[in-house]
Every structure is written in structure tokens, then in C-alpha cells.
Amino acid sequence: MPTTFFEWIPFLWKKYWPLLLKGAWTSLYLSFLGTSIGFVVGLLVAMVRTIPDPPKSKKVRYWLLKAVKFLCVAYIEVFRGTPLMVQAMVIYYGLMKFASLRLPLIVASMIIVGSNTGAYMAEIMRSGIISVEKGQTEAAMSLGMTHWQTMSCVILPQAIRNVLPSVGNEFVVNVKDTSVLNVIAVSELYFVGKSASGTYLKYFEVYSIVAVMYLIMTATLSKLLGRIEKKLDGPSEYQVLNDEEEESDV
């Protein structure tokens, strides 16, 4: 049996690497799906919150929109104001208790992470929408475009590009936050590490391996997302041709 820290590390890795890699894949898989769901939810909530209020003379539409906006704000405040671990417990065991619904762990995890991420994405997307110059909205409205046409064709393409770094950051954060799903027995990386550490009671050694794996995943994703952002920005130098140069090229 190994006796020192540097002997235990390769021993534990050789014994548990298939389970650790499977747990890491589960963490990446859940974080990607949760971020994707959260992005869609956040986008819809942000679009609803930016709808202009109708005239008070149209009482039904006015108060209906007010009620929907209130629910959106309440959703954001609740999910941003409570820990993800508590949300996991409440959603998973709450559905079992009050709805007699036992969801598969993967489905429950996607709902939990997606709901939590959606609350943050809603504010990120709202800030992106607001960052677009107001004159563009006014110009689109003057052309007869509806609010939804203006959003989908003019505002959202620019807003999504503006908030892309924040969306990528949420994805990276979710890779780490999926570790709290061990409270409902999801076999992600932290849960696998906890199970492996209990066999030989080598918690420090196992979690050192787990920490390095998390670091590799988040660092790799950060680099990859950075490259994607640079690709979307296009070349840093542009060559502007005047009319004479264009004619000579022809």
C-alpha cells in the first residue's frame, strides 16, 4: 500500500480514473444543458420585462402585463436570493412530496441548474438589451415593426453579442456549481470523489485530484470561449480601400 502523498495520488488515479472521468463528463454535460436552458429562460424573461407598458386605458392588457412582469421579478429575486443547494433540495424533494413526482436525477438536475441560471441570465440579457442604443428601437418602430419584430431582428442580435462573455462565464461557473447536486445523489465529479475518498479514507489526496480536474475543465473552457469571442470580433486590423484602389484592383 502507498505511504506518502505522492504515492497515493497515482495509486488512486489508476484505481478510480474511469469513475472520475465519468463524473467530470456528467458535470460538463449538466452544466452545458443547464446553461442552455437558463439562456432560453433568461432571454424570454428579459424580453417580457422590456415590453413597453400599454396605455392605462387598455386595463386588461395593462394589468395582465404588470402581473406577468411581477412574476418575472419574483422569479429572479427568489432564485438569485437563495443558494443553489437549497434550491436543489426544495425542487427535487418538493416535487416528490407535493406532486408525488420522482423525476430522474438527470432531468431534475437540468431543471435545477436551468432555473437557477435563468434568473441570472435574465438580468444579463436585460442589461444587453438596454445597452443597445434606444434610437435603433425608435427607428424600427417608425418603420412599423412590432415589439417582437424589433427585438428579434434589430435588438437581440446585438444584445446577445454584447453579453456573450457573461454567458460564457455563467457556463464556466455552472461547471463548478454542479458539485452541489451531490445532495440529491447525482453522480457528478464531486460525488464520485466523495465516494472514492471514503474507501481508503484519503480525502485530501482524492480531492486534490478532483480540484485539478475542475481546474483543467474551467481553464480549458475559458480559453475556448475566449477564442470564440475573438473569432466573432473579426480581424483587429481592417484595410480600407478608396475608390482609386478599388478601380485598380478591378
Image: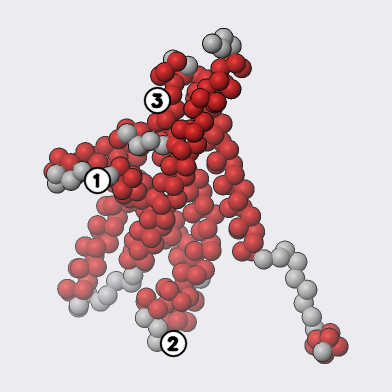
Res 3 → quadrant: top right
At 27% from the left edge and 44% from the top edge, which residue is drawn? 104
190 displayed left or right of 226: left
Task: Give percent across and percent down for residue 127.
Answer: 45, 59
- First along the sequence among labels 1 and 2: 1
Q: Is residue 212 above or below residue 56?
A: above
Please tell me whether mark 1 sits on a helix, a strand or a loop: loop
41 displayed left or right of 176: left
- First along the sequence among labels 1 and 3: 1
Q: CA distance from mark 2 to mark 3?
A: 62 Å
Is residue 170 visible in this depiction of the protein? Answer: no
At 40% from the left edge and 19% from the top edge, which residue is drawn? 198
Q: Give amino acid for label 3.
A: Ser
Crowding at dot 3, Cα within 10 Å, few <14 / some 14-19 / many 20+, comes out as: some
For this rendering, which residue is in front, 94 or 162? 94
Please tell me whether mark 2 sits on a helix, a strand or a loop: loop
Q: Which residue is mark 3?
A: 195
Q: Which mark is residue 143?
A: 2
Q: Quadrant of the C terminus?
A: bottom right
- First along the sequence among labels 2 and 3: 2
